[in-house]
Amino acid sequence: MTRPDLCLDFANTRYWRGQSAPTETLNAPADLATWTKASKIPSAKEFEQAIGLRETIYRLFDAQAQGKPAAPRDLEALNAAMAQAPARKALKRSRSGYEWDVDARSGTALALLAPVLWSAGDLLAGPRLDRVRRCANPECGWLFLDDSRAGKRRWCSMSSCGNRAKARRHYHKSKEEDA
């Protein structure tokens, strides 16, 4: 089964987007092959296409998380990529049940990213779209699905940005008390 947040995981391969030098985890075609668990390394052109798709996916879901309409060109780009990607035609048995069988032998970026594209389409058209959030830390920019009961989660994780915010508040509060 394609995880509904797989597309967000892909968008988050570039993080700390609010800083002057964001952290990039996909620096070369081999990194994309590793992330997608592909046996063939995509070409430089396919790698550039994959990075472009990642940024398109990020913009689509970032707009949603901020309550803004997505740019029509981003939806058009996603639709064009999905139209060229391998279709979901067959299921295969996996360790945890079943999953879509993708013919990724071609090694093209669209074949490698087919599950990411399906995830993006399913999330955009599905009932959990209103649960897409952007981390409240302006330096982070991480996208996530808020599965909390109340739907009020603000941080990508408490161990990262949540703790930083708490420490910052404590620091400023103690400074005010000392003044």
Image (cartoon, rainbow, N blue to C red):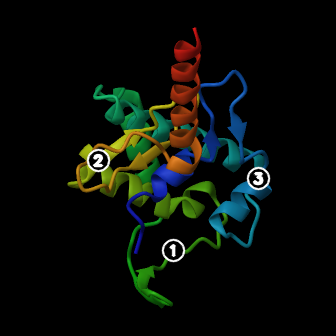
Quarter of the image with the C terminus is: top right
Report the residue marked by disc 2: 131
Q: Amino acid at mark 1?
A: Val
Residue 25, position as x, y percentages in the image = 72, 47
Q: Amino acid at mark 2?
A: Arg
Residue 71, position as x, y percentages in the image = 36, 26
Q: Secondary structure at mark 1?
A: loop
Does any portion of residue 117 appear in the rendered image?
Answer: yes
Residue 77, position as x, y percentages in the image = 44, 38
Q: Amino acid at mark 3?
A: Pro
Residue drawn at (68%, 31%), measured in percent from left and top?
22
Report the residue marked by disc 3: 29
Q: Secondary structure at mark 2?
A: helix
Q: CA distance from mark 2 to mark 3?
A: 32 Å
**Which is nearer the eye, 166 or 107?**
166
Quarter of the image with the N terminus is: bottom left
- The 10 Å Cα crowd at callout 3, few under 14, some 14 to 19, many 20 or more, is many
Q: CA distance from mark 3 to mark 1?
A: 20 Å
Left/right of residue 64 with respect to residue 106 in the rendered view: left
Asked if marks 1 and 2 touch (Cβ < 8 Å), the reply is no
**Which is nearer the eye, 72 or 128?**
128
**Which is nearer the eye, 147 or 93?**
147
Q: Which mark is residue 152?
A: none
Mark 1 or mark 2, whichever is nearer to me: 2
Residue 97, position as x, y percentages in the image = 41, 89
Report the residue marked by disc 1: 102
Mark closer to the chain start, 1 or 2: 1
Q: CA distance from mark 1 to mark 2?
A: 28 Å
